[in-house]
Amino acid sequence: MTLFRCWLLRSTGMAAHLKKRVYEEFSKVVQQLPHEEVPAKKLRLTKPSKSAALHIDLCKATNATDALQYLLNFARKPVEAESVEGVVRILLEHYYKEVDNSVRLKIASLLGLLSKTAGFSPDCIVDDVISTLNNDKSKQVLAQLLDTLLVIGTQLPENIAVTQRLIDVACKHLNSTFFGVRNKCLQLLGCLGTVDKPLTKESETGPSASATPPRDVPSLISDYFSDQDPRVRTAAIKAMLQLHERGMKLQQTVYNQACKLLSDDYEQVRSAAVQMVWVLSQLYPESIVPIPSSNEEIRLVDDSFGKICHMVSDGSWVVRVQAAKLLGSMQQVSPHFLEQTLDKKLMSDLRRKRTAHERAKELYTSGEFSSGRRWADDAPKEKVDTSGVNLIDSGACGAFVHGLEDEMYEVRIAAVEALCSLAQASPSFAEKCLDFLVDMFNDEIEEVRLQSIHALRQISTNITLREDQLDTVLAVLEDSSRDIREALHELLCYANVSTKECIQLALLELLKNLTKYPTDRNSVWKCLKFLGARHPTLVLPIVPELLSTHPYFDTPEPDMDDPAYIAVLVLVFNAAKSCPTMPALFSDHTFRHYAYLRDSLSHLVPQLRLPGRKQVAGTSSETSGVGAGSLESAQHFLQESLARVSTLQNLDSPGAQELLHFTIRDLQRLGELQTDLAGSADFCATYLHCQLLLMKALQEKLWNMAVPLCLKQNAMASTAAQQILEETYKLEFLYSGLESRQVATIHNVRLQAKALQLILIARTKRGVEPLLALCEKFLQEVEAFQRLFITELPHFQDSFVEKLLELMPRLVACKPLDLVKILQTTLRQSRFIHLKLPEQIHRALATIIEPTGESDNPLRFTSGLVVALDIDATLEHVQEPQTVVKVQVLYPDGQSHIIHPKPGDFRTPGPGRVRLITQVYLSHSAWTEPCQIEVRLLLAYSSSSSKLAAPKPAWNESMEGLPTSENLIEGTINLSKPVKVFIMPKPARR
Amino acid sequence: MPDIKVTPLGAGQDVGRSCILVSIGGKNIMLDCGMHMGYNDDRRFPDFSYITQNGRLTDYLDCVIISHFHLDHCGALPYMSEMVGYDGPIYMTHPTKAICPILLEDFRKITVDKKGETNFFTSQMIKDCMKKVVPLNLHQTVQVDDELEIKAYYAGHVLGAAMVQIKVGSESVVYTGDYNMTPDRHLGAAWIDKCRPDILITESTYATTIRDSKRCRERDFLKKVHESIERGGKVLIPVFALGRAQELCILLETFWERMNLKAPIYFSTGLTEKANHYYKLFITWTNQKIRKTFVQRNMFEFKHIKAFDRSYADNPGPMVVFATPGMLHAGQSLQIFKKWAGNEKNMVIMPGYCVQGTVGHKILNGQKKLEMEGRATISLRLIDGVCASVIILEVKLQVEYMSFSAHADAKGIMQLIRMAEPHNILLVHGEAKKMAFLKDKIEQEFNISCYMPANGETTTVTTNPSVPVDISLNLLKREMALGGPLPDPKRPRTMHGTLIMKDNSLRLVSPEQALKELGLSEHQLRFTCRVHLQDPHSDTDTLSRIYSHLKSVLKGYAVQHLPDSTVMVESIVLKVSSSAEEPDLKVVLLSWCFQDEELGSFLSTLLKKGLPSAL
């Protein structure tokens, strides 16, 4: 003991000097980092050989086919940034000599590909490419060369001189007779052209242009809207859109041209034109455009809305999808126009505002088209005055009606989405589109049905369902698809209904659902919870009926285990929460049941303020701690307990263990009571638990005794170290919302645990050899810590890590046994680090809903064959569940299988929640009697995931040279409680 | 001017007996050859004597095209081909070819075997007739002969229904047959490209209807059936064997599947099984959903729908029965109706149109008591030796009407017109009054002429076909070199050339080439003209004054002063002379060749104005 003290004194004296050295070394390390990552030596070796090889290959090629083959082979391999220049030169050299078009074309395309290489600046080859462009005769090659220039141009966006040159080149070749060349020129203009700067060198392009004033890029592009080739027309529109995307403001004059293109013969032109019209409608929503057929005017956004609506009944489904999608984002459109989209008949009012007189006439004549829903109502009426009423072609009319009954489900989905986003912006429209969305619940494709239920959920805050609407909505509850039913439950959680009959109806249907599909239990209960909480006043009048109470007679007490009865109670209790008069209607057993449910299903049954005569035991005392749901006080409590713990300066201080014990217990209980803080509380508790374990392991008597005398303690300490390690992995990977400071803290604890392990090994094992490697590894980890958490270091005053880093130079130099000794002291001297909590921590959580583990009937199957087990689980706060969540199956003989569910098995019903519905295949050799297997979910982690992602190899996707990090740790954490499944593999019958 | 003639023999301002004759570019085509449901005499078939009084039709018709298998579109086919006589090709799509003979045979059986008619076509005739059929694929261009080509487009309506484009040269006609613009549970929507035909012959069954959304109708239908079943009632759906029946089956089948319902659905047997077989086969003609999912499960392999047996009608408990025929006028559907009519829990759903006089029509109009002829009951009254009994049937069951007809509504027709962009429209297959309404709408909306001829009335439409001319590449290139950078497709351009009409072909070549080909020598045509000028200067001075004047006016032209006292402007020669008597009156001799006519006349008018004194 004295010896340690002595050393400590010396070391404090040296501290200043050492610190300086550490920082010096540290800064050096940072500088060296980039050098380490680039294997420069290797590159230099390959460079000459690569271009030379290419040169030789190309010279060897006797005919075009061979040369092409060489080039194709060459293109498969990556080229490093330094050697690009050389390769380009060789390619160009061959280009000049080559007579075959296809080879020249390939070379041109290679030039483009090469100039994309990261770290290579392609401005040196601009001149060459342009000069070849001027000399080449083949149109295909020209187009390819322009494409190469396009690549170069996009690589050098800030080089104005190059850009200007490229624009000039593009203008010059615009009047080529080959569509490909024109296409590429327009692309170039779109990608590089600027609006403000007129084209100065325009006069050179042709003799006829001399008279015209200098023109800007958009007007030049717009000339090609009427090109004879549809591909060029498309390219022109796309170039214009590209200009827009690059932030140039398009002129409104383009609008008319774009509208004309909407009736083009070719679908790709129409498709691009729809986009264009939409862009313009967003740019100039409020400007006024005339209506061609009359002398009136409307807002541009309305006009374009009508036009795009028209495209929803286009001949090509690609255009239809696009039009339907775009409609959703046109929210500035007048409500008047919007509502037309849902009505096929009322078409006339769209195009012009009409006098009241005319409107009255229309009302009179509105019977002119029959709906086909009633028999014989299409008998021709008296001749109506049809003059001036333009009924059919008024764009917006019934656009959504058409879209929703389109043949292609892609269109239908787009229409549903558009309807949804428009309805979110306009409550009155939401009201109107309700019926249509409800109709979609009946679609033949499940995806569409699901989408429309989701859409309705999203707009349901805006609307109140009428009884008949609710009726149709509820009809879907009988759907055999689980997804549909659950989506509908979700919808009902958010829905507003208008009358008490609606509540009754909903309850009835949900109970029906419950009897038909018992597995929906949780979902139905949850749904009723929200339904009750939303409509207390509507529930109130039907409470006696629901609970079947009678004013005079006592009714039999319902069965408490009946899910249907629980469902009713959930509805009533949640309604009672905001309706204090309701409990008066309860009968005695209802209160008892309340107490029971409040305890067993606390997430569904709220805290009720019950009348004084019947205080239910247990509830009041329990809740006083949490207060009436006050989050703040819980938060406060959490902070306080943490502060209390942080007063512990040293691990050895008396009473520290007790304090930790109690705090951990408190925190765990807090997490259970206050779900919002569960993540934080759990996190802290686990962290403190680590500290506690560490503390116990470092108890003095263990270390002062000789090894053989305290084998038991030794074993205890090593399990503690192991446990701490596991806990730290949990801390790091199971909780989301951690900041790098918390991660650093966790790593610190992990280092402590590893140090402890090292010490224990040193104590038990004889010989230095195994220790050497372990020490080496440990030191590497310390360095890694320093690399990763440099910015966090100031927070780690007096911590284990900080002390280690101070001693680092000595540690590196000294012998393993000395090192262990130093570690031992540091471990005991180091200060307990106060945990700082981030805003929100969530613990990843999984619950296996199915299988329930309650079944006594074994799953029988023939051994050697497989049986599929349905797994249904909910995951909360799991990042990227598709990659990290696994299913583990543990057989009684200790065999364990880990199954990776398909990405498609993960569904996201809401933010932060993921549902895993999958099947795992079980198989085993024959057993004599049924036995239980365990199924659980695992969270896979790897320590590399917390580090920076490795840079992607450039140019092509070859993964050969990717370095694998040495100290990669992979493992799994249990994510859910195991569920037992009874299975029985039978021997195969011969 | 060439024209296209269209004469409906049936379906002109009428529904049923579709048969339309088209003469286009010297070809005669018959579109559809149907029978009329409403008649049992000669009026049931089109009047083929319109085409020729005696002899066979083969010489007068180039081809016959059948749009789909409904009897009002193909019922008269064996009669025409075998009894009247036609040996030319008959075109129809594959499914139509498969299903059509089944329906014809069924029709024949009812007419001959049940009603006992004679002088009707036989089974053998149906077979012989079908041998003349040439099958069509969608979007396949079939060359009937060198000039006439036809192409089929998808029409929805029923399995295998097609619209046909008939094309001779640049003239074309599109005949829609029956079509449906809204997809249903088993078929897609009609589609046509922008083929801009001269005439679009379209059906107009629902000329005055704009139907509600299909979804509404489906939902109502399912809701009604579902409610009735839940009440424990029986639901009767009278249908015709093919077409709507399959759609409703799929609708109910998927609903049953989705909702996990257990009540049985029956389909009265007969044609159905055979027909369903074809529905299973021709998956490519159905809609997206069925096409995409048939690998897992063919939608036409019904799980819940079973064959009906007469005895099932008395079974207790809920059930749904599809029974033929559709208008409740006879057969199984009527029998079941009689059994179930008395119970108010039961329901009958009429999914389509009902002809006047049928039971279906009566109950739809709200009649609560029906007089039925009952053959089964023995009557005690003898009236003129005929045994007859009248039962009063009280209708207590619910009667619902659901329009599931697969015809385009007014908006659908308009949509098709917009898709095809025709120059003229001709309405058939509809009631006259409703047609007139739609005709007004079309003319007003699209500003194109629309016709609605009655049966036997010929509509003539003058066309303006473009005449293709081969142009020599050299000439084209020369023109290109002269003109701007690119041809503007929107604007016509004039060019010089010689049109050679030889051996039924037209060619445009350059004059030189034409001369060479025809072996003619070129004749120079020169114009000369004298212009009198008052000018006091000497001849040579005048000439040089003229030269400088022209030089200043005609910039960009080659103006030369030649030593032999002439001035050349391009190829125009100017000379000045004066007589001795009047030295001031100069005579300017101008001479130009025909090609420079424009410049020459410009010069002569310029000189007539005199020279400016400033020179």
Image (cartoon, coloured by chain):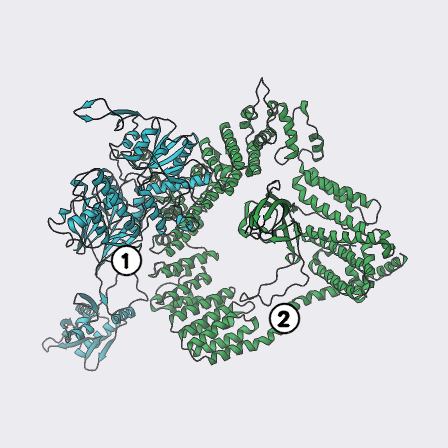
- In the image, what residue type sits under mark 1? Thr
* Nearer to me, A239 or A547: A547
Q: Residue furthest front?
A: A990
Give the position of the C terminus of chain B as an image quadrant.
Answer: bottom left
Give the position of the N terminus of chain B as an image quadrant.
Answer: bottom left
* Nearer to me, B422 or A711: A711
Horizontal and vertical percent position of residue A379: 27, 34
Please name the residue shown 24% across and 35% down the image. A383
As drawn, B577 above or below A561 = below
Asked whether the viewer can see residue A344, the reply is yes
Horizontal and vertical percent position of residue B280: 36, 48
From the image, tell me which residue sits under label 2.
A39
Judge from the rendering whether residue B146 lies leftward or rightward of residue A433; answer left or right: left
Q: Quadrant of residue A220?
A: bottom left
Horizontal and vertical percent position of residue A652: 83, 49
On what subunit does the disc labeled 2 rest?
A: A
* Nearer to me, A144 or A246: A144
Horizontal and vertical percent position of residue A455: 48, 42
Q: Residue furthest left?
A: B581
Judge from the rendering whether residue B238 lies leftward or rightward of residue A584; answer left or right: left
Chain B rendering hue: cyan
From the image, tell me which residue sits under label 1.
B141
